[in-house]
Image (spheres, rainbow, N blue to C red):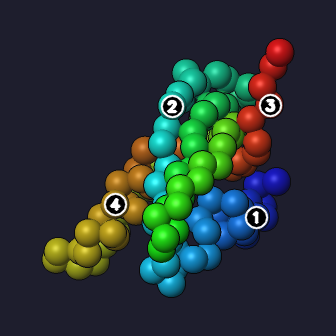
Amino acid sequence: MESGFREEFLTLLGRDIVPQTVFSGNHQSIVRFYSVSEPRQVATAKWEVDIVATRVDRNANGEISEIPLNRTITLKAIPPIEPTLGEEEPLAWRRKVYSLSTNGLMITEVIPLKIKS
């Protein structure tokens, strides 16, 4: 799934995670995290983390709904990326992106969490 992960994840964000009404200002949405598992190694330089979370939505009328966002996230080790900002004082969002890139991990897959019974 790695090669098309970016497009697939953006589709997931737009469809399941961020309601379209948020972008028009008619809706507020937050994610509450209840549990993040310890990473478990599934292959050489590859780990999985389970996340149990809920998206809480509030529409313009104040009505609230909750949607489970339980996911398993797969990460792989990559060589840390050294920032080449080229600016004297980079914008805050750019500093954040670079700080995430230097940690040596990349998300390769996000799938629904399978609850074992």
Kindly report the distance in space between the C-alpha atoms of the residues bearing marks 1 and 3: 19 Å
* 36 relative position to 13: left or right: left
Residue situated in front as seen by the camera: 17 or 109: 17
| Residue topped by disc 2 | 34
Task: Say whether marks 1 and 3 touch (CB < 8 Å).
Answer: no
Mark 1 surroundings: few (<14), some (14-19) or many (≥20) residues within 10 A:
some
Quadrant in the rendering for residue 11: bottom right
Tell me the SS state at disc 3.
loop
Mark linked to residue 114: 3
* Amino acid at pointer 3: Lys
At x 49%, y 38%, the residue is: 33
Please state which of the two labelled residues, at mark 1 or mark 2, is closer to the viewer.
2
Residue 96, label in figure: 4
Seen from the viewer's position, the closer of residues 93 and 61 is: 61
How far, Cα to Cα, is label 4 from label 3? 31 Å
Mark closest to the chain's N terminus, 1 or 4: 1
The numbered mark, 4 or 2, whose residue comes first in the sequence reads: 2
